[in-house]
Amino acid sequence: MEVYPKFPKETARDYAMRVLKGNIISLDLKPGTSISENELAAELGISRTPVREAIIELGKAYLIEIYPQRGSFVSLIDPKMVEEARFLRRVTDTAVIEEACDQADDEGIALLEDNVSLQEFYLSKGMTEKIFELDNQFHKTIYQIAKKDIIYEIHSTLMIHFDRVRTLSVETVKDFKVVGDHRKMLEAIKAKDKQTAVELVNKHLTRYKIDEKEIRSQRPEYFKA
Amino acid sequence: MEVYPKFPKETARDYAMRVLKGNIISLDLKPGTSISENELAAELGISRTPVREAIIELGKAYLIEIYPQRGSFVSLIDPKMVEEARFLRRVTDTAVIEEACDQADDEGIALLEDNVSLQEFYLSKGMTEKIFELDNQFHKTIYQIAKKDIIYEIHSTLMIHFDRVRTLSVETVKDFKVVGDHRKMLEAIKAKDKQTAVELVNKHLTRYKIDEKEIRSQRPEYFKA
DNA sequence: GATGATACACTTGTATACTACCATTCCTGT
DNA sequence: ACAGGAATGGTAGTATACAAGTGTATCATC
């Protein structure tokens, strides 16, 4: 597991949360790995209490399975969880992008424009590892434009189920398509073209479904059933 | 605040969570009330740790506002939160009921049938206070039929923002309409009539919007802005 | 050797002690 | 009378200690 440095004024709980989330998404903490509260506390140089609070929160999102008096484990990739996350994301993303078409102002569009331009830049330079974070930020900005930022936040932890599958998908070809999708979405929002925007979101999210089967055959030990 | 008895094998954390949620929904804990970790721990006969864990979880859902080193308070009813909750519920409920139309089997329909029959019974007897819980159970069952029970669970805490407004709405006339809506939804699911089902969900949820203005004028001290 | 009991090391759940910080109050000096 | 500051009480954040339970490994017994 990779231990990031702790920010000065960051609470120990937020710190533990940040490290755990990051390592679960990056798969440095592989599905099935055991997580010891004591051990993690020692590694991070904090006490059990904040570590425990972080683990509980991730347990609520089914990212860590907590068995009392036995141990806690990074959850295996559960197709049902991935499917629910994908379903939820498709449903809310489409509804939110419609709202964004109505409510987008110059400031919001400028934020999206900057983001997509950066994605295109990194893509042209072959620095595809930078795109993951920009991808998330792009969608977050759309939620903010639609004044639905709480919903984004509530869903973000659940979407880690989805993000793990994304991390495993190594096809760089896809980055090209993803960035292209984002550009088209931005243009649809500019034009307030709801119908096109919704179609783009749906197409965008189906890209990942195909990969899942490939990944599953390559890494069956990461999957639940 | 009303202190329920603790179940035998229930963990202290789950117990604290149950009591807090219940009292926030019922408004026995009024918006703006201060919550002391020490005081609550003493009232429930448990220690600060599990109480604290429950408060943190409700803080994540913006139902309790935590100001470090100052205190924690039951959040005021925030129209933005209520709106986001309503939006999320409308969007997911419509998508889920479509799935339910596809996937409903005899067993699921029987569960819904029993539930609605009970609602109609309590309504005819004027026992409208029983309908609140059945209402929630009805929608939960639809999510289960659509195999989206995790989504229901993830959203349930956020929906308390919505539930508080429901608790304040005293118009019993509405119960009549709500139960009627449920009956019609059930029939639509039986007939696999997605379009009608979606229309019903949308109409169903707009009922609450009207009340909010009335309640706000009657209880301005409960509202945020 | 196979089997069962028991001690042990480990886990999470809970309780308690301590720390840093904030807001108020009340006392002191001007 | 008023302003400033120290003392005080209370809060959430963190650390540590203890309790209750689980799985394993060891050892005695058959």
Image (cartoon, coloured by chain):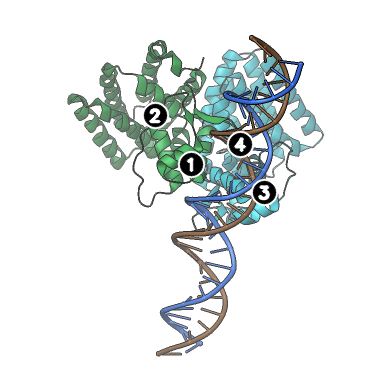
Chain colours: A cyan, B green, C blue, D brown
- Amino acid type of the residue tagged 4 in the rendering: Arg
**Residue labelled with disc 2:** B25
Tag 2 secondary structure:
helix
Task: Indicate whether C23 appears above or below A217.
Answer: above
Foreground label between 4 and 1 = 1
Which mark, residue A207?
A: 4
Q: Nearer the viewer, residue B45 or B211?
A: B45
Residue under disc 2 on the same chain as residue under disc 3: no
In the rendered image, residue B159, in percent from the top left (x then y), is placed at 44, 29
Kindly check if marks 3 and 4 are in contact, taking CB atoms under 8 A apart as contact.
no
**Residue labelled with disc 3:** A46
- Amino acid type of the residue tagged 1 in the rendering: Val
**Residue labelled with disc 1:** B51
Tag 1 secondary structure:
helix
Task: Indicate whether A114 appears above or below B50.
Answer: above
Label 2: how many Cα within 10 Å (few below 14, some 14–19, many 20+)? many
In the rendered image, residue A80, in percent from the top left (x then y), is placed at 49, 44
Task: Indicate whether A139 appears above or below B46.
Answer: above
> Residue extending furthest right?
A125
Q: CA distance from mark 3 to mark 1?
A: 21 Å
Kindly check if marks 2 and 4 are in contact, taking CB atoms under 8 A apart as contact.
no
- For disc 1, the chain is B
Foreground label between 2 and 3 = 3
Q: Is residue A24 left or right of residue B151?
A: right
Q: Residue at x 31, y 18 (%)?
A: B170
Q: Is residue A208 left or right of residue D4?
A: left
- Amino acid type of the residue tagged 2 in the rendering: Ile
Foreground label between 1 and 2 = 1
Kindly check if marks 3 and 1 are in contact, taking CB atoms under 8 A apart as contact.
no
